[in-house]
């Protein structure tokens, strides 16, 4: 059995947005008891990750680390068609992930106790991002 659905997320600009609940709802609608859910973001300047969902300091630390690793406005980048955060956003998405595979057990995402699924918006301006979830079981 294969089930696919998609949803959109409005971002406030650069941020980590918890999408665990929405992904879980898609998995529940799929009717799959045991299988695999694949989450995919359809953009080149946003990414996905599974990480700690209990302490918001983790998300802040990740943002600060990435800002140091790939700073906006770095003169090394030629591509700046949409501003100084344009190419850094592309690099950030390449360094992270545009898709995730998550086991499905008993009709639910089989995440660890402190794990959540996050959309990582790498642009500084708000965007509307499209995510798809495919559940195979």
Image (tube, rainbow, N blue to C red):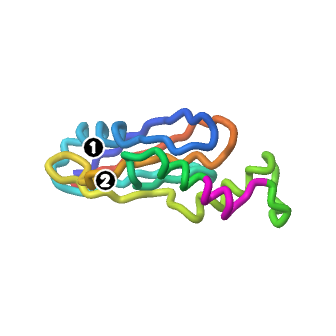
Q: Which residue is mark 1?
A: 27
Q: Is residue 50 left or right of residue 9?
A: left
User: Residue 34's quadrant in the figure?
Assistant: bottom left
- Residue 62 image point, x, y percent: 54, 55
Tag 1–tag 2 contact (CB < 8 Å): yes
Out of 112 and 47, give the one closest to the viewer: 112
Q: Is residue 105 left or right of residue 58?
A: left
Q: Is residue 110 left or right of residue 18?
A: left
- Residue 46 image point, x, y percent: 58, 50
- Residue 119 image point, x, y percent: 49, 46
| C-alpha distance separating marks 1 and 2 | 7 Å
Magenta range is 64-72
- Residue 28 colored magenta? no
- Residue 67 colored magenta? yes
Q: Secondary structure at mark 1?
A: helix
Q: Secondary structure at mark 2?
A: strand
Q: Which mark is residue 37?
A: 2
State the residue at coordinates (69%, 38%).
Answer: 125
Magenta-highlighted stretch: main secondary structure? Answer: helix
Q: Which mark is residue 18?
A: none
Out of 66 and 25, give the one closest to the viewer: 66
Which of disc 2 and disc 1 is earlier in sequence? 1
State the residue at coordinates (26%, 52%).
Answer: 113
- Residue 32 image point, x, y percent: 19, 47
């Amino acid at each position: 059995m294969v089930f696919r659905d998609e949803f959109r997320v409005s971002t406030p600009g650069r941020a980590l947005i918890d999408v665990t609940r929405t992904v879980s709802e898609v998995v529940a609608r799929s009717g799959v008891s045991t299988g695999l859910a694949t989450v995919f973001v359809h953009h080149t300047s946003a990414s996905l990750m599974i990480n700690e969902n209990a302490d918001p300091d983790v998300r802040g630390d990740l943002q600060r680390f990435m800002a140091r690793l790939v700073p906006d406005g770095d003169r090394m980048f030629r591509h700046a068609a949409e501003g100084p955060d344009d190419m850094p956003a592309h690099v950030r998405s390449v360094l992270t992930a545009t898709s995730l595979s998550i086991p499905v057990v008993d009709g639910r995402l089989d995440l660890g106790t402190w794990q959540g699924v996050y959309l990582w918006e790498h642009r500084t301006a708000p965007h509307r991002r499209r995510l798809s979830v495919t559940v195979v079981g």
